[in-house]
Amino acid sequence: MELVIAFLIGVASSSLVGYLAYKRQKKESDTSTSRLLEAFEHQLRQSESLYSTMCVLNEQTEGIQSGLTSLRTDVEQHLANGPLVGDAKLRVLVGAIARASVPEALTVSPSSRTLDRASVCKLHATLFPKGTAQGGSLREQRVWIGSPGSTPKTAVFVPPPPAEVPPTFDELLQEWTLNYPRLAKASKKQKVESISNFHYRFVSLHPFLDGNGAMAKLLLAMQVRDLIGQEVNLSFQSLAYFEALAAANDGDLEQLTIIIKGALR
């Protein structure tokens, strides 16, 4: 809000200064003075409109955040009666909460300079309501990605079996931590490529039972923030994104890199 007020003051000040300087020249006619005042009034009207719009957006953001907090509390009270088992609808709801919690989790996330299993699992747990069994724990079940009713044979993608998750996960995180000092000095292009490679490897490993997409986006945003100094538009997930992941399965990371680069802001 302070930024908006400062913006309005700046617009008003610059317009008044311009008007006074123009007047001191004593060359303006009544017509030109009138036009200048009209331009000044027009700027003020635009500023007021922008101020009102930003106030509405601020209220909507606060309302969404308040609703998310309330929903999380309700789910936590439900989970207090027992672990989340067999309730498919509630599981879907918990997954939606995890995805919506990424922006807030990013604001309190540590540096991505050093990543290990404990720190990433802790971050994963913060995305879920308290009492959620799958929050913060590596998966111990076989999973596959596909349409409802699909099997491992008909699935679009089958991540590694549970036994391979811990060592592969540790290897990925250790490799990132080891290469971070070099990446910090690399070009932006190299940084984006390395982040894209990490993102794909994390998603394809599917280390958690639920919340892998949300966790992948959180890590992506952390890495971009720390290495590139920019933010990421986290709504980039689309058909093109899934097609890029499919291409990456065949060894082509170019499409995914283009999408991630385009999401930077």
Image: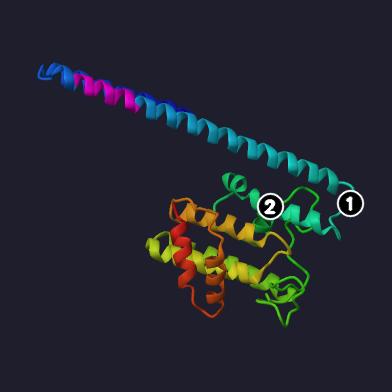
Q: Is residue 18 left or right of residue 95?
A: left
Question: Is 74 in the magenta?
Answer: no
Return the mark for residue 24.
none
As drawn, 169 above or below 12 = below
Is residue 119 visible to the viewer in this orientation of the structure? yes
- Residue 40's spot in the image, x, y percent? 29, 24
Residue drawn at x 84%, y 57% as measured from the top left: 87
Q: Is residue 72 left or right of residue 7?
A: right
> For the view shown, which residue lies furthest in the front direction?
31
Chain part drawn in magenta: 33-43
Q: Is residue 134 left or right of residue 48?
A: right
Label 1: few (<14), some (14–19) or many (≥20) C-alpha neighbours in 10 Å: few
Chosen colour scheme: rainbow
Instruction: Calculate the distance from the C-alpha at mark 2 to the C-alpha at mark 1.
Output: 19 Å
Secondary structure state at the residue bearing disc 1: loop
Is residue 113 visible to the viewer in this orientation of the structure? no
Dividing the picture into quarters, in which one does residue 28 lie? top left
Secondary structure state at the residue bearing disc 2: helix
- Residue 114's spot in the image, x, y percent? 56, 58
Q: Which residue is mark 1?
A: 82
Q: Which residue is mark 2?
A: 98
> For the view shown, which residue lies furthest in the right direction?
81
Name the main secondary structure of what is drawn in magenta.
helix
**Nearer-the-camera pick, 231 or 259:** 259
Dividing the picture into quarters, in which one does residue 120 lie? bottom right
Of callouts 2 and 1, which one flags the residue occurring earlier in the amino acid sequence? 1
The image shows a total of numbered marks equal to: 2
Q: Amino acid at mark 2?
A: Ala
Residue drawn at x 64%, y 49% as measured from the top left: 100
Query: Mark 2 touching mark 1, by CB under 8 A?
Result: no
- Residue 179's spot in the image, x, y percent? 49, 66
**Nearer-the-camera pick, 205 or 22:** 22
